[in-house]
């Protein structure tokens, strides 16, 4: 295990953890319910760590990413259903990320939003075309570390630490009306979905193959999952806590991503604002790249095509054509004029419906001793895996009714 | 696993990715062709690869959709060209010699060969 590679891998995971949905829902959750939803972030982070570690282990041992194996395990018909659902979920998420980057650039430069969405899409396409996989992952992930400003701002905002720490204990605030209770439930489900987005697992396992992981990388995979995602989640929790301190008491609803940047602007002024916006820019752009590549990985792996950006674009032609077309399809979705926040809500809603279908085959594969040998799930991982599968299945059932009953958390 | 012993078709072969002797992905085991007579041992004659095989595995409307997008060609991989079976099916020859990489080659013509590290 190369310590430099490991450190870079962990830092990349930290910088790449937050995306537009987490930004939005963390800020809204903090302003609406104070510190009371911190535990949902922490709880979901353990879930994504469990499943990412599993997917990385399967990639390292079987040398096959999730979707290659999913079709073998689920068969063609059910596999196609999962593929179609994943494509829709990832496409909406990718569109939300493109819209988010364009909005942030609009704040930074004043350039109009819609032309900016075209420039952003072309910029992302060029970056994937030009850079090999490792550079794509590192560039966006490491530049996303500007997001650390939110953790620093939390200290500068002098939170009530005791109350903040009590947010890590599972709770439902007392004295909520039925309407508020439903809203709390919707936010909890949305946060689970935003933290455990299916694209993260597809991208992570395919990335393991892109980087040529083998059984020797099992420890690297475990440390990257636990430390990278754990520390990344602390950034999202910082956003929530800052929002609880700054926005909640004055009844400000951070409806747009720009409001989130104010969390750093209030304690640090103009430079705090610029660093926060740059962090958001690279983190959200990185998530845009990940969602699009995750979609192209899924399609190419399902049909057995050449894939990967460790190859030159012309060495995996159908894969290359697919990610370009998917970026353009996401752009078309944004250009219809649909609001970024609406896209974020749909992305979160659709993703939670797909999550059980994504995680079940992974759980079965990683626990299969015939397939994984000595690297199959141990008793703790197996128990955690099934527990979280139950949670995402319950969340999937509850998501749509909660969305309708609360008008997407605005009820 | 060597391809000369007994094999469970669904759990050990169907829907596995195929990798050729150059390490290239060149499709999925979409179906198999068997030889033999009733009451005797069945043998795998070839692996069938390509969207044309979905006709038997998908509802008509879904197959129609797939055919519109991807066509209905089928390539045959003789069982003798299968080297081993594990998490993938490994071939002993390049996929191009069996007609497995036609679509990749066709699309490659439209992809510029420059500008990438």
Image (cartoon, rainbow, N blue to C red):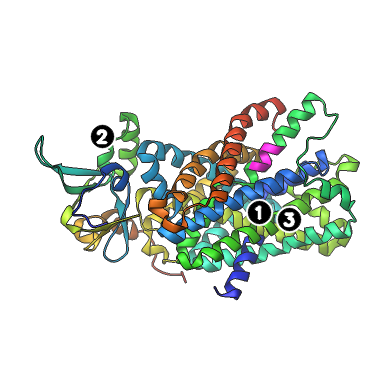
Residue A302 on image: x %, y %: 39, 48
**Marks 3 and 1 belong to one chain:** yes
Q: Quadrant of residue A346?
A: top right
Whether residue A363 appears in this view of the structure is yes
Tell me the chain of label 3.
A
For this rendering, which residue is in front, A138 or A288?
A138
Q: In the image, is A364 to the left or to the right of A288?
A: left
Q: Is residue A404 magenta?
A: no
**Marks 2 and 1 belong to one chain:** no
SS for callout 1: helix
Q: Quadrant of residue B42?
A: top left
The Cα–Cα distance between marks 2 and 1, rounded to whole angstroms, is 45 Å
| Circle nearer the viewer, 2 or 1 | 2
Q: Name the outermost residue toward the front.
A: A379
SS for callout 3: helix
Q: Which residue is mark 3?
A: A234
Q: In the image, is A137 to the left or to the right of A277?
A: left
For this rendering, which residue is in front, A18 or B92?
B92
Q: Quick check: A93 above or below A289? A: above
Check whether the beta carbons of the residues at disc 3 and disc 1 lie within 8 A of each other: no
Could you say which disc has been placed on residue A101 in the image? 1
Residue B90 on image: x %, y %: 27, 59
- For disc 1, the neighbor class at 10 Å (few under 14, some 14 to 19, many from 20) is many
- Quadrant of the snapshot with the N terminus of chain A: bottom right
| Circle nearer the viewer, 3 or 1 | 3
Q: Quick check: A227 above or below B36? A: below
Q: Which residue is mark 2?
A: B56
- Quadrant of the snapshot with the C terminus of chain A: top right
Q: Quadrant of residue A342?
A: top right
Span highlighted in magenta in the image: A188-192
């Amino acid at each position: 295990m190369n310590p430099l590679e490991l450190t870079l891998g962990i830092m990349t995971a930290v910088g790449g953890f937050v995306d537009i949905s987490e930004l939005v829902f963390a800020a809204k959750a903090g302003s609406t319910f104070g510190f009371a939803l911190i535990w949902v972030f922490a709880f979901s982070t353990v879930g994504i760590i469990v499943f990412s570690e599993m997917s990385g282990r399967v990639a390292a041992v079987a040398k096959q990413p999730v979707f290659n194996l999913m079709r073998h395990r689920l068969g063609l018909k059910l596999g196609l259903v999962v593929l179609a659902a994943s494509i829709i979920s990832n496409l909406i998420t990718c569109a939300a990320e493109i819209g988010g980057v364009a909005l942030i650039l609009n704040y930074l430069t004043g350039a109009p939003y819609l032309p900016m969405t075209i420039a952003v899409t072309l910029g992302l396409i060029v970056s994937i075309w030009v850079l090999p996989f490792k550079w794509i992952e590192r560039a966006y992930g490491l530049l996303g570390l500007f997001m650390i400003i939110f953790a620093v701002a939390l200290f500068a905002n002098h939170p009530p630490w005791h109350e903040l720490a009590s947010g890590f204990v599972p709770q439902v605030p007392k004295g909520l009306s039925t309407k508020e209770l439903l809203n709390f439930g919707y936010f909890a489900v949305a946060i689970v979905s935003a933290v455990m987005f299916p694209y993260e697992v597809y991208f992570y396992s395919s990335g393991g193959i892109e980087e040529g992981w083998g059984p020797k990388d099992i420890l690297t995979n475990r440390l990257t999952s636990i430390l990278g995602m754990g520390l990344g989640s602390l950034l999202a929790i910082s956003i929530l806590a800052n929002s609880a301190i700054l926005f909640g008491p004055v009844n400000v609803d951070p409806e747009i991503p720009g409001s989130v940047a104010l969390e750093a602007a209030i304690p640090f002024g103009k430079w705090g604002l610029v660093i926060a916006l740059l962090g958001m820019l690279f983190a959200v752009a990185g998530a845009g790249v990940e969602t699009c590549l995750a979609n192209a990985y899924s399609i190419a792996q399902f049909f057995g095509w050449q894939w990967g950006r460790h190859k030159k674009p012309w060495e995996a032609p159908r894969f290359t054509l697919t990610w370009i077309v998917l970026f353009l399809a996401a752009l078309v979705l944004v250009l219809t004029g649909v609001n970024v926040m609406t896209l974020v809500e749909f992305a979160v809603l659709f993703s939670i419906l797909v999550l059980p279908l994504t995680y079940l085959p992974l759980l079965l594969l990683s626990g299969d001793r015939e397939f994984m040998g000595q690297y199959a799930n141990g008793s703790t991982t197996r128990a955690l895996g099934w527990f979280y599968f139950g949670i995402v299945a319950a969340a999937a059932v509850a998501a749509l009714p909660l969305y309708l009953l609360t008008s997407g958390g605005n009820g | 696993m060597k391809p000369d012993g007994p094999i469970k078709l669904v759990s050990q072969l169907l829907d596995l990715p195929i990798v050729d002797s150059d390490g290239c992905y060149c499709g999925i085991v979409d179906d198999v062709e068997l030889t033999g007579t009733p009451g005797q041992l069945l043998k795998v004659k070839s692996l069938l690869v390509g969207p044309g095989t979905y006709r038997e595995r998908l509802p008509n409307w879904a197959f129609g959709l797939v055919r519109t997008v991807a066509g209905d060609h089928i390539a045959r991989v003789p069982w003798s060209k299968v080297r081993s079976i594990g998490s993938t099916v490994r071939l002993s020859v390049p996929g191009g010699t069996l007609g497995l990489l036609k679509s990749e080659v066709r699309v490659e013509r439209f992809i510029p060969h420059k500008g990438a590290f």
